[in-house]
Image: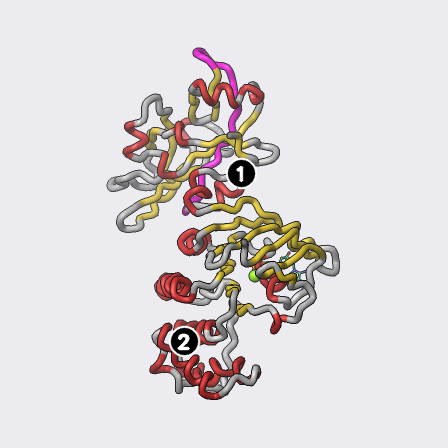
Amino acid sequence: MPRLRLEGLSKVYPGGVKALDAFTLDIAEREFIAVVGPSGCGKSTLLRLIAGLDEESGGKILLDDRELNGLPPRDRDMAIMFQNYALFPHLTVAENMAFGLKLRKTPRAEIVARVSESARMLGIEDLLGRYPSEMSGGQRQRAALGRAILRRPKVFLFDEPLSNLDAKMRAQMRVEIARLHQTLTSTMLFVTHDQVEAMTMGDRVVVLRDGVIQQAADPETLYRDPANAFVASFIGSPGMNLFPGRIADVTGGAAFVHPLFTWRLPEEWRRKLAAYSGKSILFGVRPEDIGSAAARRAVDAPAIKAEIGVVERLGGQSCLYLQASVESGRSADGSAFASRPDDAQGCHAGQVVELPVFAANGKFFDPATGAAIR
Ligand SMILES: Nc1ncnc2c1ncn2[C@@H]1O[C@H](COP(=O)(O)OP(=O)(O)OP(=O)(O)O)[C@@H](O)[C@H]1O
Ligand SMILES: [Mg+2]
């Protein structure tokens, strides 16, 4: 039985903006769902509808099979933590945390016990007497988190709670929330525009675009088997390279033909792509499948000759951003791509290199619909 069931949830704002379109998802008890998508795709709208802060235009919200539609937020047994978590500036951390329980007329002894338990979980016991202005951003974030968890709701809703933090603090809070999830065993719905955050935290990741679910799957599946070109290029840093080309007959059979390389299709792809013969198509290849040691070892790997535009050195790993070299005289259109070689020492901008493509790991997408061809 799913704990939280969202059935065709939709929201059209006055003025006609369709922010959420038939969002359907079953979320299990204790599951951690990360919803990821670009700015404006409907993430906050989704959480506001679930929390009851906004009214849906259609669809149902069920918690443990109880319909929540129409119930005020306080009767929904959920805690929401916003991007701009507001702590009351004139209250100490302890008072901030206790605020909601006081409103609910919780007995004093229980409030004290719950505040200290949450503070202990988050390692902020020493900060209970401080005012928000006397703490760092990360400490404030933790206090806000403490305020949310001590309500012990069935469902936690997080709206980009980490986006105001610096990179290091964000990584730390990510681990903290994951640990909290293990301890609290509550259902969590976490929305973010950051795919790394979503991929590292979610049991399942839902990719949202213009209010429509693109794919809902575990992180591994999402990465290995994207449902469409949008998911392929959104997930990954950088995302999957999409080479626009066409399927054509060359000597030896059907091939994928792109200005920078030609790949003679193996039998299986020939069959699956029969309907695309002579037509345009998108070929997706992950950066780590271009120029890597595995690509070098691959049999029948086509090679791309291109010019390095930028070398991004990340310590253990490097990423090359390339384009068709000027000398090759080929069109630069659709020829920019990224590569993650195992060793980029000695690579520099302006250099023309020839990189093998591990094409067998590639994916094809329909250029009109973007759907993966499987
Ligand atoms: N009150 C409103 N009235 C009209 N349109 C709105 C309202 N709130 C949001 N929208 C529109 O609905 C769409 C979804 O907005 P939403 O805030 O859910 O996006 P989001 O995914 O949370 O974006 P972000 O990552 O920037 O926070 C956007 O196009 C937005 O402009
Ligand atoms: Mg938002």
Quadrant of ligand 1: it is: bottom right
Q: Position of residue 209 (x, y in %)?
A: 58, 49
Which secondary structure type mostly characterizes the magenta part of the structure? strand
Q: Which residues are magenta?
A: 237-253
User: What kind of element bears circle 1?
Assistant: loop
State the mark number for residue 118. Answer: 2
- Quadrant containing the N terminus is bottom right
Q: Position of residue 212 (x, y in %)?
A: 61, 48
| Circle 1 crowding by C-alpha within 10 Å: few under 14, some 14–19, many from 20 | many
Q: Earlier in the sequence, mark 1 or mark 2?
A: 2
Is 169 situated above or below 93?
above
User: What kind of element bears circle 2?
Assistant: helix
Question: In the rendered structure, which amino acid carries the disc numbered 1?
Answer: Asn
Is 354 situated above or below 184?
above
Q: Nearer the viewer, mark 1 or mark 2?
A: 2
Question: In the rendered structure, which amino acid carries the disc numbered 2?
Answer: Ser
| Circle 2 crowding by C-alpha within 10 Å: few under 14, some 14–19, many from 20 | many
Q: Position of residue 267 (x, y in %)?
A: 44, 18
Residue 290 or residue 64, whichever sits in front: 64
Task: Quickly name the residue at label 1.
Answer: 228
Residue at 31%, 38% (x, y): give it.
Answer: 341
Q: Is residue 102 magenta?
A: no
Distance Cα–Cα, label 1 vs label 2 = 42 Å
Which residue ends up furthest to the top in the rendered image? 251
